[in-house]
Image (spheres, rainbow, N blue to C red):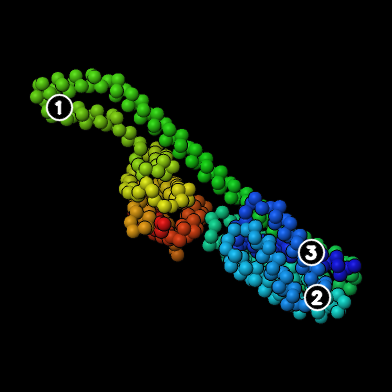
């Protein structure tokens, strides 16, 4: 009875770890939750039945891979990639199984060898946590960093604890200890996933709030521009009479001056950026207007096509974070100045933001150092660098005597 109970419980927790592995390498289609649950039950029943009927390692391995491949069918990706992932999981599981058996056999008799299965699950969970850190670090900008390292310690400590309890003589206490350790390890995974989801939601909320403010600002500029246009149409007759009178008097210079003044009253000087992409224009104009409110001198040179093949959402996050950092730093400088340059050439989007700054700033290995920068400026830059790397681009940070410089290159298409 004890054997079957441990076997079923360990298989259940092993299934949860396998699904974590699949989620690390493949994208889950959220509409297939019921299918995944059904296929998971098939894996539980199938692996348990084959193991009890045949007790042949090769058959068990083949069945395990086949049923994992069935579960992976609800994930996105090519079949060859899914098969490779399932093979990796199966091989890692077999290696953990052998390691657990080798470590526990001195304490367990031949009749109690099945307790090593609990240690197998914990070992596999430790490997999954390490792989997740490695994979996510290079791919995502919304991962919990320190929390991830802390929570990864749970399965490691659980493995140590489980190794110790295998030396217990009483079967019932050993059983309770194994179940408890597996439960703690699984809860650590669930807790991390919740933290990652909450952080991602919070960052998306901040981004959307900034987008809303940018849209409000752009709508206000459009309202002011429309009002000026209406006033111009209303007063057009008077302006024509004035120009006609000056023309009859031969006052060519006064006519040019009058037209120039008329043009300046109509052009909205607040709309500094016109890329043709409404979302990008709104965000940049909003932030640059904010810079002017801080008495910062802003120079822009933006030449990018309207149909550029790049994620506008991610581009706005990159430019928005860099500009916010630049405004914050330049506002504290004696000479308040920002230079924004965006160019597109040969399939590469070039981005450069220069800002003046106050106080000493150290940059080593592309990272800003110093207490002050670590609390604000450096954090934003690290998130931007992660996002640029996700686009297969690069972001270089440097400091001159006058400017803090962020230069990025993002491949497009």
Say which of 378 and 23 sits in front.
Answer: 23
**Location of residue 252 in the rendering, given as x and y in whole percent from the top left corner:** 12, 28
Q: Quadrant of residue 186?
A: bottom right
Q: Name the residue tied to disc 3.
A: 45
Residue 325 image offset from top left, x and y in percent: 44, 49
> Is 94 on the left or on the right of 354, as rendered?
right
User: Sequence order check: which comes first, mark 1 or mark 3?
Assistant: 3
Q: Residues within 10 Å of mark 1 (few under 14, many from 20)?
A: few
Kindly report which numbered mark, 2 or 1, lies closer to the viewer in this rendering. 2
| Label placed on residue 54 | 2
Please indicate, yes or no, whether residue 291 appears anywhere in the rendered image.
no
Q: CA distance from mark 2 to mark 1?
A: 102 Å
Task: Specify which label sits upstream in the sequence, 3 or 2.
Answer: 3
**Image quarter (top left, top right, bottom left or bottom right) of the C terminus:** bottom left
**Disc 3/disc 2 C-alpha distance (Å):** 14 Å
At horizontal 35% and vertical 42% (from top left) the residue drawn is 274
The tag earlier along the polypeptide, 2 or 1, is 2
């Amino acid at each position: 009875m004890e054997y079957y109970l441990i076997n079923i419980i360990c298989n259940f927790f092993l299934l949860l770890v396998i699904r974590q592995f699949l989620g690390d390498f493949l994208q889950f289609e959220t509409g297939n939750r019921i299918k995944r649950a059904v296929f998971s039950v098939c894996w539980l029943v199938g692996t348990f039945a084959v193991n009890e009927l045949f007790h042949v390692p090769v058959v068990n391995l083949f069945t395990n891979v086949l049923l994992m491949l069935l579960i992976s069918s609800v994930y996105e990706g090519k079949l060859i990639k899914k098969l490779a992932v399932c093979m990796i999981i199966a091989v890692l599981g077999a290696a953990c199984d052998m390691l657990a058996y080798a470590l526990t056999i001195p304490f367990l008799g031949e009749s109690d060898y099945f307790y090593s299965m609990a240690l197998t699950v914990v070992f596999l969970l430790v490997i999954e946590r390490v792989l997740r850190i490695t994979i996510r670090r290079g791919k995502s900008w919304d991962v919990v960093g320190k929390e991830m390292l802390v929570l990864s310690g749970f399965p490691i400590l659980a493995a140590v604890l489980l190794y110790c309890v295998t030396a217990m003589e009483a079967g019932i206490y050993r059983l309770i200890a194994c179940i408890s350790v597996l439960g703690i390890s699984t809860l650590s995974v669930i807790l991390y996933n919740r933290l990652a989801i909450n952080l991602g939601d919070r960052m998306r909320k901040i981004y959307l709030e900034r987008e809303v403010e940018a849209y409000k600002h752009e709508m206000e500029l459009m309202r002011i521009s429309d009002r000026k246009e209406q006033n111009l149409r209303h007063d057009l007759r008077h302006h024509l009479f004035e120009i006609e009178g000056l023309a009859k008097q031969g006052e060519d210079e006064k006519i040019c001056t009058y037209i120039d003044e008329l043009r300046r009253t109509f052009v909205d000087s607040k709309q500094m950026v016109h890329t043709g992409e409404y979302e990008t224009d709104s965000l940049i104009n909003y932030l640059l207007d904010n810079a002017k409110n801080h008495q910062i001198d802003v120079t822009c040179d933006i030449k990018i096509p309207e149909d550029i093949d790049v994620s506008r959402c991610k581009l706005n996050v990159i430019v928005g974070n860099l500009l916010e950092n630049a405004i914050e730093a330049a506002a504290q400088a004696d000479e308040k100045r920002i230079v924004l340059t965006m160019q597109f050439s040969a399939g590469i989007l070039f981005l450069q933001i220069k800002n003046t700054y106050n106080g000493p700033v150290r940059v080593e290995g592309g990272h800003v150092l110093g207490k002050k920068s670590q609390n604000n400026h450096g954090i934003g830059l690290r998130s931007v660098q992660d996002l640029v790397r996700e686009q297969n681009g690069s972001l270089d940070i440097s400091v001159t005597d006058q400017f803090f410089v962020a230069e990025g290159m993002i491949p497009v298409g």
